[in-house]
């Protein structure tokens, strides 16, 4: 009786050939399947790598943008925190910048008082066109020139000296308007805030007198009302009539040594005239912007 091997194995050459052919076909089919699976796994791995790289680039850029945003937010918060400190204690560079920006619009005023002694102050440009320039100053400085005959009033800035015409004045507010025969002079912006300052704000007085073409001093607002700003800014004779500016360089008031809105003189602190009060009489200010002098004379 033949064994199971004898029964399975072919006994002829043809049978052996068919067996080998079938084995070869089976091996080829298995190889094809294995290769296809290999290609499938390879493609899947490549897709995963590609997705990871693309996702990494996107996440990396997102992280960088988030860091940049946080940095800018932090810088903005720091600037906001430093703002009040800068107003409270202005550095020398801050004072220098304010003086440099404002001094082209500020002139030194010199004349004589009723007894023939020198009377000085400052004035600043409030309007200028192709015909003339309007300068606002302190009545106290040019008081003697309001009488006839009166002394000549002159202004100087750097090496430039000019005679000016006293056009009008408002004694109660210690304001006077001068007309300068020069054209297209730079003017200082007026603060549009209402009120222009708050108690505790840092303010700066600018004079047209100084070795650098001007001088500047600073102080704190102690109190304010609709008709006066009180501060401890030191107003020497050369500063009266000059601008009081805020930390942005905008005019908030006119410096004065004589203004007494409450009927008593100052003692260590000075009352300044809010800048928009100049529009009541000495200036014409349509839409709040000065562009013409008030009525001539008192």
Image (cartoon, helix red, strand yellow):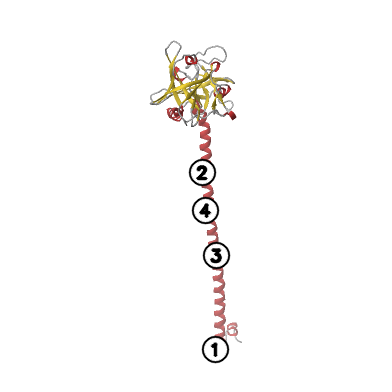
Q: Which residue is mark 1?
A: 13
Separation of residues labelled 2 and 1 (CA atoms): 81 Å
Separation of residues labelled 1 and 3 (CA atoms): 44 Å
Q: Which residue is mark 4?
A: 57
Q: Where does the image place residue 102, in percent across and percent down from the top left?
A: 46, 28
The reply to whether dot 4 and dot 2 touch (C-beta < 8 Å) is: no
Q: Nearer the viewer, mark 4 or mark 3?
A: 4
Q: Which residue is mark 3?
A: 43
Counting other residues with Cα less than 10 Å from the Cα at mark 3, is it few (<14), some (14-19), or many (20 or more)?
Answer: few
**Mark 2 or 3, nearer chain start:** 3
Secondary element at tag 2: helix
- Residue pushed farthest front? 149
**Mark 4 or 1, nearer chain start:** 1
Q: Nearer the viewer, residue 159 or 232?
A: 159
Separation of residues labelled 4 and 2 (CA atoms): 16 Å
Q: Nearer the viewer, mark 2 or mark 1?
A: 2
């Amino acid at each position: 009786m033949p064994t199971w091997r004898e029964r399975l194995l072919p006994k002829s050459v043809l049978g052996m050939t068919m067996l080998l052919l079938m084995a070869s076909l089976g091996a080829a089919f298995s190889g094809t399947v294995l290769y296809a699976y290999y290609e499938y796994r390879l493609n899947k791995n490549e897709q995963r790598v590609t997705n990871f790289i693309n996702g990494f680039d996107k996440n990396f850029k997102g992280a960088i943008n988030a860091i940049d945003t946080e940095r800018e937010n932090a810088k903005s918060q720091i600037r906001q925190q430093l703002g009040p400190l800068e107003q409270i204690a202005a550095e020398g560079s801050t004072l220098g910048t304010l003086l440099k920006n404002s001094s082209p619009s500020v002139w030194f005023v010199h004349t004589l008082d009723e007894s023939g002694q020198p009377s000085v102050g400052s004035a600043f440009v409030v309007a200028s066109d192709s015909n003339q320039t309007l300068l606002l100053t302190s009545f106290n400085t040019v008081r003697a020139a309001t009488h006839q005959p009166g002394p000549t009033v002159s202004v100087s800035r750097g090496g430039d000296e000019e005679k000016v015409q006293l056009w009008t004045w408002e004694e109660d507010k210690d304001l006077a308007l001068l007309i300068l025969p020069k054209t297209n002079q730079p003017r200082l912006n007026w603060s549009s805030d209402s009120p222009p300052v708050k108690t505790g704000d840092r303010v700066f007085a600018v004079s047209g007198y100084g070795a650098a073409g001007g001088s500047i001093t600073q102080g704190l607002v102690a109190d304010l009302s609709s008709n006066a700003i009180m501060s401890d800014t030191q107003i020497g004779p050369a500063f009266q009539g000059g601008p009081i500016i805020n930390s942005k360089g905008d005019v908030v008031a006119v410096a004065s040594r004589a203004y007494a809105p409450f009927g008593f003189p100052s003692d260590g602190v000075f009352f300044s005239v809010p800048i928009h009060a100049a529009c009541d009489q000495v200036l014409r200010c349509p839409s709040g912007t000065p562009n013409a002098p008030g009525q001539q004379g008192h």
